[in-house]
Image: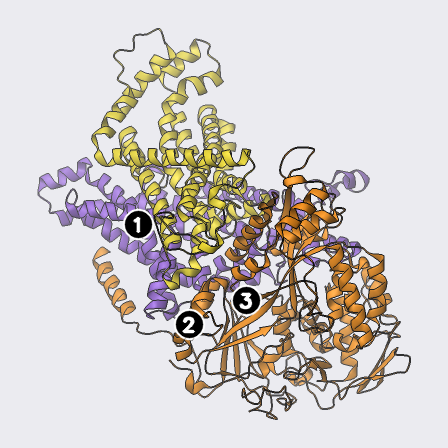
Amino acid sequence: MPRVALPTFIILLVCAATAGPARATLMPSGQQPFFGTTDRIRGFDPVQASDVYTVAAISKVYEGLYEFEYLVRPYRVRPLLAESMPEISADRLTYTIHVKKGVRFADDPCFPGGKGRELTAEDFIYSWKRLADTHNRSPRYFNFEGRIVGLDEFRDKSVQQKVDYDKPIEGLRVLDRYTLQILLKAPYPQLTYVLTQAETFAVPREAAEFYGAEFLNHPVGTGPFIVADWRWHNYRIEYVRNPKYHGDTYPTQGEPGDRERGLLVDAGKPLPLLDRVTEYVIADDSTAWLKFLAGDLAMSPISRDNFGAVVTQERELTPELRARGIRLDVALQMATFYVGFNMEDPVVGPNKKLRQALACAVDLKKWVKFYNDRLLPAKGILPPNVEGYDSNAPPAYAFDLERAKRLLTEAGYPDGRDPKTGRRLTLNFDLPQANDPQERQSTDLLAHFFDAIGIELKPSYNNWPEFLKKLERKQCQMYRLGWIVPYPDAINFFDLFYGPNESPGPNESNYKNPEFDKLFEIARVMDDAPERTERFRQMEAIVVRDCPFIFLSHPLSYRLMQPWFKNYKYHDCPYPNSKFYKVDPARMNH
Amino acid sequence: MTAPVLDHVATAAAMPARDTEMAVSLWRTAWRQIRRRRLAMTCLGIIVFYAVVAVYAESVYWYYRLRQETPPYKVVHFEDRFAKPTLQHPLGTDSLGRDVLRQVIQGTRIAFEVGIYTSLIAIPIAVIFGALAGFFGRWVDDLITWVYTVFDSVPYLLFILAIAMVVGKGLFGVCLGIGLTTWVGLCRLIRGEYLKHRDRQYVLAAKSLGVGNLSIIFRHILPNVVHLVIISFSLRFPSAILTEVILSYLGVGVQGEPSWGIMISDAKIRLWQGYWYELGGATVAMFFIVLAFNLFGDALRDALDPKLRTAEAKTA
Amino acid sequence: MLAYIIRRTLYVIPVVIGVALVTFILFNVVGWDAATQMLGRHASKEEIAALRQQLGLTGPKFFNFTAALQGPWWRLFDSQWFHYMKQLATLDFGRSFASNQKISTLMLNGIVPSLVLAVPIFLITLVVSITIAMLAAYYRDTWIDRSIVVASVIGLSVSYLVYIMVAQQVLAYQSGWFPIWGFESAKYLILPVLVGVVSGLGSEVRFFRTVMLDEMYQDYVRTAFAKGCTQNTVLFKHVLKNAMIPVLTSVVLTIPFLYTGNLLLETFFGIPGLGYLNVEAVNSTDYPVIKATVFVGSVLYVIATVITDICYAMVDPRIKLR
């Protein structure tokens, strides 16, 4: 046996050594392929669209009545599967929407003859009933909860038994084949925004019933792409162009400056511009980075550790990267990151001065530097690109150790020690990610800040599901989180502080303030107007004063792009945007 | 060849009144053999050095913990991040300006804690089960054999991950996981030894004298198998350290304190820029202690019971 | 012989039950509340209760005494434990919590990449390490032997992680010889296989060398040399065959572990096998997947031990008499 083994081994070695440059990935010639990254997704069922990656995947295959304009700013809603913007009755309780004619679902064995049928208004009613059906266990029903006449009753019935989808619901009417009508219980100006969300996308009844529990693996939609391969769920998803796409076109309007940046070159062309999109799930940041540098991926964020080597002091790319034609795109995200206090915790909850002391101990300048200036320091819940943000107002809790110590003494903890026990005050801090070095190191920095006023921070690293569970059960004392708006309306930020939204809702800090709640309820039903913006200002002032959060930062999105990757523009709701991307295959091969 | 020597020792233990001059102790012979091998002595020296460092690190940890202050290896020097090695920071600093050398030293402490705690969990289980199974035989043996066959079948790393998932991360979860999955090998060996010793003359003699079973197991036979425990400890220690590194990388390891695994995991992203001090420091520190334990364990095994080299494939 | 085989095979059953018991205790008893995690934050108490019922997490853990007292006696077995046993018997592992996919499908999909990675590593390591071990035996007590020993001990003292990281950095990224990550074609497997072989050589060579040397010092070898056989004949005709028994044990016993996939290699190099699946499951606290993989892995191991023992019995007649 060994006599054969050695030569075999040598041959293998030789083969390996002569394997040659192996960077180019598989690419059928003449096609427009795109390689990106994603994270594990929960399947392609729109009612299960709970995290950004799943939503991005679903948005490639399914569509909704409305979507956001790609290039126009400030963000504006445009009809996608609808003919036009909804007709709203005078009392603002009835919305009439006309569905576009001639839109077909993708071909699939679930249809008779395998050919996709035309989209009708009934499809949306069916899809929204699916969302309400508790049997589908959707985490996204809350946008419709308490809004539409008759839908909550449908939902409650579904808890006990299997509901009949053919029974009509009072608040969701079909006027004719292409027209539907929604009856609201109270004015809901955000409804149009809600109709851009993935959970409202149209699914055909045939597919849902044909595939049953496997529906999440067999998407059948009207979107620009169809799923070509999803054999290994946590490794790769491959999409190809939908040959039956209804032919939405590339936008013709944009912001000033878009034309100069070449974003309107493809104006009016039929979508999608790509033939194939392949997205890998790369768990390890450093591996993804290496792949980008090697030219295997079209786009990449910049991790904190690499920042200094990629971006110079002047916020420009280093010469080596620039020489390769790689471009840098910087944009402000509509998001806020913060440290939250559990207002029901006996130590931090009732003690406003303690919270304020901790807020004053955080040196945001150092924080920003730690993150290589990839974020803007936050002084409130609203980021700068949202109405209601007051750029002139000074931060309420600027870094001031003296003030922090003073507040701490007033809070009852002189020098950070608990007078009853004589020991340092120890606060528990829950985090959502266990094996992220950046999270660990930034937590150590926070601990360093609090150490300066004598308080000890005890971090507890969980993984995401555990962390959510702890929040739901109000088991955290302090926690770290961020809030990214589902759609670009500032009212979303204030969901975090509305009393009835307490855990398990989005108000994880369980903050309750009746004055704030009243303002929120009024602002919620107002249309976008200066009066609403004024209310936003008042609400933010209350929240800053009461300090249920230590506001940390608003992130900047830094993305690197290969020279052959075109038509990218940062968008706060970027989920369907791969239909606008284009690659230049001639420039792809290195 | 060693068997008669063991019998001598055992006989002497069972009848302490006897003259023990003729008994040439197994331990003394082993020690002499090891002392002659330079490599083994060097490794012993390395182990002792590391142990001293670990004790020092432990005392640093407790000193600052009792005084409720932040220990120097955790102090953040923001301005000094990612510094190259200098006299003040012989291995440079990490992403928060913390001294890498100090962290490596603390990593030694964690490594020793992991090694010791896992042994404290695995060895008693193995010894008690093996002794009971080998000595009593019949249904006790069948039951215990069933238990360890079950534990042996479960895929090693997966089982540890599962335990850590359920019991919680951190030192306790890791040590419990490693401990509960590595006791089987030693248990088998001990069971084999007890099966052999059970019918030896000194045991029969003790029984006829009316000595109780438990006493026989632990006072008479156990000293004859202690060498197995020591060898197992010396080989299990490095394997526990290596496993902890992998677990830390997977996010399931020790939390909050700098362990070698966490240092390696943190250092990974900067490799492409050529910054390798954090990775190098932790790897080299780990390499020498693991190597030393492996080589010394081999020497120990050769000295105490050479037959073990191929017994039961992987012992530790 | 037949009696031995039957006896040995029957022993599988209590072991498999034992493994099921271990996984059950770990995940159903010590473990946690599955339904709340699966439904997420906006679920109501009724929904959580309904799902718990669906997943079989309600009711008593082992025996249902209350039901047995009230109704027919066989209701005693209406408990979580027996429900679990029934699922295992029908190979129904349920659905993953993180992705709601059928676990049996996930496992089937993952087996191919895992095997495609693990089998070459296994075969190449086996062949290479036996070759090197024989070299060491051939040149025993010379500098060649000593350097082989030193190299193998050094090899097994370096952490697996370091091998992987250095390989990816130097061989994939900096030199561009191999792809960095992924599973697109055969080329993508070369680097992980290489790393797997090199990192495993240390302990394998050490073990095989010891086995060979032990055989070399046996009396019959001395006799063979005295009779005038050459090194080659002794080595290949006598020693190799006898050394095969411990080698066979260790080899066959690693086979079932091939399937669990090399967790680290797969995660680092992006091979979507069972190891990759497991690490993802741990990261998302996806208990059903881990529960299933632990169980299946154990069963495969048990089957492999039975096969080994039977092979032994066929090869070594002394064992049958035990």
In the picture, the disc for residue A260 is: none
Question: At 35% across and 27% down in the image, what residue appears?
Answer: B227
Relative to C173, is A466 on the left or the right? right
Q: Residues within 10 Å of mark 1 (few under 14, many from 20)?
A: many
Q: Within the image, what quadrant is residue B236 found in?
A: top left
Residue at horizontal 59 percent and vertical 56 percent from the top: A363
Identify the image quadrant of the N terminus of chain C. Answer: top left
Classify residue C69 as left or right of residue B190.
Answer: right
> SS class of the residue under badge 3?
loop
Label 2 resides on the chain identified as: A
| Camera-side residue of A429 and B302 | A429
Q: Residue furthest top?
A: B17
Chain letter, purple:
C
Kindly identify which residue carries mark 3.
A374
Please tell me which of labels 3 and 2 falls first in the chain: 2
Q: Is residue C55 visible?
A: no
Q: Amino acid at mark 3?
A: Arg
On the image, the x and y values in percent for residue A399 come to 62, 55
Q: Which mark is residue A293?
A: 2
Q: Is C131 left, or right, of A172 in this rendering?
A: left
Q: Nearer the viewer, mark 1 or mark 3?
A: 3
Q: Is residue C180 placed above or below A451 in the rendered structure?
A: below
Q: CA distance from mark 1 to mark 2?
A: 31 Å
Residue type highlighted by circle 1: Gly
- Residue for badge 1: C155
The answer to which image quadrant residue A585 occupies is bottom left
Q: Which chain is orange?
A: A
Q: Position of residue A343 (x, y in %)?
A: 75, 50
Q: Is residue A25 visible?
A: yes
Q: In the figure, A436 relative to A197: above or below?
A: above
Classify mark 1: helix, strand or loop.
Answer: helix
